[in-house]
Amino acid sequence: MMGKIKRRTTKGRILCQQLSPMINLLEKCSRVLPLRSLKQKNQGPDPLFFCVVSPSLAPYRNLGSLMHDKKPAHLIYSISKSPEKTPSNKKEVVRAFGAGFLCHYLLDRAAHPFVYAQQFALCNAGIEGLDKRDGHEVHAVIESELDEMILYTHTGHTVSSFKPYKEILQANEGTLAAISHAVCSTFWETYQRLSPANLFEKSVHNYRKIQCATYSPHGFKRNLYGVVERRFRRHSFAQAFCHRPLALTESAFDNHEHNVWVDPFTNECHTTSFEDIFTNTLEEANTVIPHFISGSLSLDETIALCRNLNFSGKPACA
C-alpha cells in the first residue's frame, strides 16, 4: 500500500508541474503529446469534437461524444457496410477509413480504462493542487506522455521531426467528401440523427487548424497558452494538449513495472503495461480486419467483438 501511495504521489507531482508550473511540488519536469498521431484513417470520430470551431456546425457538437458513448457494435457494423453505398471509385477509400475507425475503437476501448484508472487514483490521492475537478487535464497529460513514448519508441521521431498537422489528417477533398458522406449515413443508420453531408469534412479542416495551432516543438506556444489559460483556471488544458519533443523510452504512466491496476469500469485487476495493451490491440486488429474489410462481419459477430463496451471501455449507454 505504501508503495502505491508513493507512486501516486510521484505521478501527482509530475502532473502538477506539467499542469501548473507555479505549484512547486518537485523540481521542474515536463512531458507531453497525444494518442492521436496516426494517419487520417485512424482518427475515428475524434475530428468531430472540433466541429465547434465552425459556428454553423455548433448544433452538431455532441455527435462525436454520441459515437464514443453509445451503440458501439451498431456503429462499427454500419461503418463496415459503408462501402456498399459508396461510388465504385471511392469504395477502397471508405473501406480503409472503416478499418482505421475500427483500429481507433479497439485501442481506445483497451487503453482508456488504463488511463482512467491512473486519472482517478491521482485525482483522489489527496495531492495538493490536484483533485477530481482536474480530470480533463490529468487525462490529457497521461495520454500525451504515453503518446510521446509510443511515437519515439516505434518510429524514432519526436515532434521536432514529426509534424502532426502535416503527417495526419492527410486526404484530398474528394476523399474527405466520400468519407464525410459515409459518416453522415452512419449517423442516421445508427442513431437516427441527421447531419450535414460535409460535417466530417469540415471537422477535419478544423482539426488540422487546431493541430497546427498547438504544434509547439520549442515550447513557446505551449508556455504561452499555459500562462493565458491559468489566468482563468488553475490548470491549462491547452498546455497539456501541446506536444513536446521528448525522446521517451518509458513513462511514469506506462506501468512498465507491471504493477496491479484496477479497471474502474469492470473492477477487474490487471498488470498489463501500456506497451502490452498496444501490442495486444495490434494483434486483435490483425485478426478482425480481414473479416471487416471483406464485409463478411455480421452484426452478431460485431456485437460479440464490441462486448457492449464504448470507446472509453465503459459499458455502452443505451
Image (tube, rainbow, N blue to C red):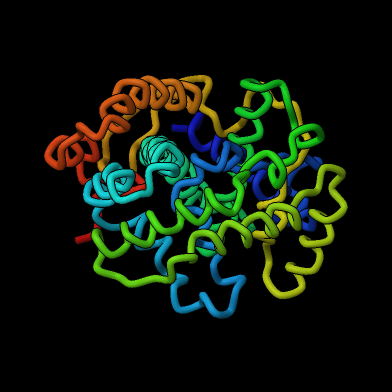
Q: State the residue at coordinates (68%, 25%).
A: 152
Position of residue 300 in the picture relative to residue 230 (left or right)? left
Q: Is residue 73 above or below residue 259?
A: below
Horizontal and vertical percent position of residue 250: 63, 24
Quadrant that contains the C terminus:
bottom left
Q: Is residue 111 visible?
A: no
Q: State the residue at coordinates (74%, 54%).
A: 214
Q: Is residue 19 visible?
A: yes
The foreground one among 179 and 259 is 179
Horizontal and vertical percent position of residue 26: 75, 42
The foreground one among 94 and 207 is 94
Horizontal and vertical percent position of residue 242: 71, 50
Q: State the residue at coordinates (33%, 44%).
A: 83
Residue extending farthest left = 300
Q: Is residue 295 above or below residue 207?
A: above
Position of residue 211 in the picture relative to residue 297 (left or right)? right
* Number of callouts: 0
Q: State the residue at coordinates (76%, 36%).
A: 159
Q: Is residue 315 above or below residue 289?
A: below
The foreground one among 30 and 225 is 225
Q: Is residue 295 above or below residue 278?
A: below
Horizontal and vertical percent position of residue 114: 43, 37
Residue extending farthest front = 88
Quadrant that contains the N terminus:
top left
Position of residue 53 in the picture relative to residue 225 (left or right)? left
Position of residue 32 in the picture relative to residue 195 (left or right)? right
- Classify residue 202 by image quadrant: bottom right
